[in-house]
Image (tube, rainbow, N blue to C red):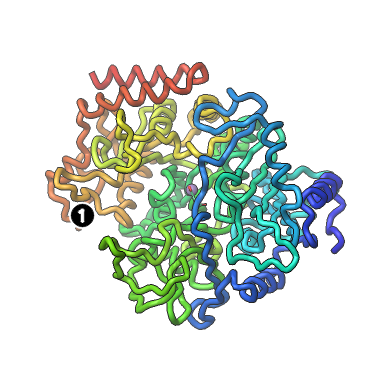
Amino acid sequence: MSAPTKNKKLLAWVAEVQKMCTPDRVVWCDGSKVEYDRLMAEMVASGMAIKLNEKKRPNSFAFNSDPSDVARVENRTYIASLKEEDAGPTNNWIDPVELKKTMTALYKGCMKGRTMYVIPFSMGPIGSDIAKIGVEITDSPYVVVNMQIMTRMSPKVLEVLGDEGEFIPCLHSIGAPLEPGQKDSRWPCAPIEQKYIAHFPEENLIWSYGSGYGGNALLGKKCLALRIASNMARKEGWMAEHMLILRFTNPQGKKFHIAAAFPSACGKTNLAMLQSTVPGWKVETIGDDIAWMKPGKDGRLYAINPEAGFFGVAPGTSKASNPMALESCRKDAIFTNVVVTDDLDIWWEDMGVECTGGTDWKGKPFKPGQKDAEGKKILGAHPNSRFTARAELCPVICADWENPAGVPIDIFVFGGRRTTTMPLVHEALDFNHGVYMGATAASEATAAALDVKSAIRFDPFAMTPFIGYHAGDYMNHWFEMGDLLGDKAPRCFYVNWFRKDKNGKWLWPGFGENSRVLKWMCERVESKVGAKETAIGLMPKEGDLTLDGLNIPAEDWAELMKVDKELFKATLDDAREYLAKLGSKLPARMMVQFEALKKRLG
Ligand code: O2Y
Ligand code: MN
């Protein structure tokens, strides 16, 4: 197949990888439907994909991964900067020369017996000045079809790239060469000790080996759009964040744009597609996971969603929790590690529909409610099972979701999962205080991960696994963006949807009702409502956050909004200890905020 580009750098890189990985053939991908259909047909024939019932789930397919390859592998993910201190304490680091040596040995001949696919893609609307071009080389046809949904793949990408344009090279191999006559497994991959998800920030280069799953393999997502992009953004004066983007429009038609950062599996996709319960207020989705934001000519911060699809967690997605996500995968979808029902549709735990039986994610016969020998419920879908769905199929996708100029961000929201201490919502006193709030965002550790000293885990800006450089420098970049944006910087809020009472009952209904909280934020921005100043920040005045029809007893509301100074003070030591780990790169301004909060708490 002749190459559809004259870009010298790209042609040289493809030739170099071909020589190293020795695939049987090279295929340049164009993102077309013909290509998608051909690859799916090949994967169905090989037994890797299951074609779902055309009447129930048109043009959709299910895959089951190897049980050893079911999630991102953070302990095998590396930031291989030239200097260790540039990766910082939140990243794994290996000297880039050493890592390249180790990985080159693995890459040698790794695509034998397989096809090497070259995927030119754009993160962000093609041609947008916030977008970036990447090229992924992979030996996984599953990666190609997922990249078709998650990124913009089309001949236009190579047109924009031209003969001299720059791209981010993303090399991926599942690490499972095939000898002649060797039978392929359904989900080939390498053992854990051979998996490497490597980032070389000085070269804007990604090398991934050994895993075919999600963020390890779809390199446009976490690897490029967060780890490499966060480092580029810092150098170039913009931001690459783990944030959903939504538009919230009030009954008068005024539009507010909100970017919100929550740790993985905290309901970002649900919030991005929220169905507002506030009469006349409407949510439209722009993105559910990643925001790229750049100051515009008017001095405001403009955001695009660099992705073109959703790679959402399946279990728990239901008509009640997120009907819009379910609708987004009504057709043209890929499902990974879910139950395939007897009538060839899909099912997962807490989907809210009946399943009479099928095949679980490990390929075994399955009926909901079955228990294992120890009496534990057998799960049909893996807890990290996923749907890959086209964003354009989301019924509430915003008309501006592909606007190359992006949308102006009014509000940043940070949060974590806390059953105590953190009230439902509070606002930062100013942008720098907002940076402190984002930097000290924390969740309660699960029992399994509970460490001896502290029950909370800090996850600054929900970016811990995704900051492609030193976390101290990253926090400083946030302060510097605030300096640059000045009074046009977004207003900052902190939410906690997860507070419980002393009997373990949720105090806030969540889901669509979260729109009430977003409305209060928008009315703060518009100066329509005031706020009570408390030690931790600004909080809603009585009656400003409307609770009509919710039946929340007054004492529950008081508990939900309670700021227990003693409890807060008790977490300060944890925060200080966490921040101290960032050493000399911790911005002085962070400690100024810490001391100010301490003083306010008395
Ligand atoms: O396990 C994976 O590879 C997927 S992780 C993921 C997928 C979509 C959105 N966010 C995440 C995440 O871990 O934050
Ligand atoms: Mn995410």
Which x, y percent locates residue 337? 48, 64
Q: Which residue is drawn at 29% across and 40% down?
A: 418
**How crowded is the residue under tag 1: few (<14 C-alpha within 10 Å), some, or many (20+)?**
few
Residue 94 appears in the picture as rendered = yes
Q: In this view, does 584 lie above or below 110?
A: above
Say what secondary structure mark 1 lies in: loop
In the displayed structure, 200 sits above or below 480; it is below
| In-image side of 59 versus 132 (left or right) | left
Q: Dot 1 corresponds to which residue? A: 548
Number of on-image labels:
1
Task: Name the image quarter holding residue 600.
Answer: top left
Quarter that holds the N terminus: bottom right
Rendered location of residue 56, percent (x, y):
48, 80
Q: Residue at horizontal 25%, vertical 32%?
A: 532
Q: Does the residue labelled 1 lie within 8 Å of ligand 2?
A: no
Q: Which amino acid does label 1 sit on?
A: Asp
Name the one closer to the observer, 568 or 40: 40
Q: Can residue 305 be seen in this view?
A: no
Residue in the picture at 41% in, 64% down: 381
Foreground of the two, 220 or 481: 220
Residue 591: x, y in percent? 41, 18
In the visual, does 389 lie left or right of 599? right
Q: In this view, does 560 lie to the left or right of 257?
A: left
Where, quadrant-wise, is the C terminus in this rendering?
A: top left
Q: Is residue 197 above or below residue 235?
A: below
Residue 333 point in image, percent of width and height = 54, 68
Q: Nearer the viewer, residue 327 or 468?
A: 468
Q: Look at 47% across and 58% down and name the residue there.
A: 312
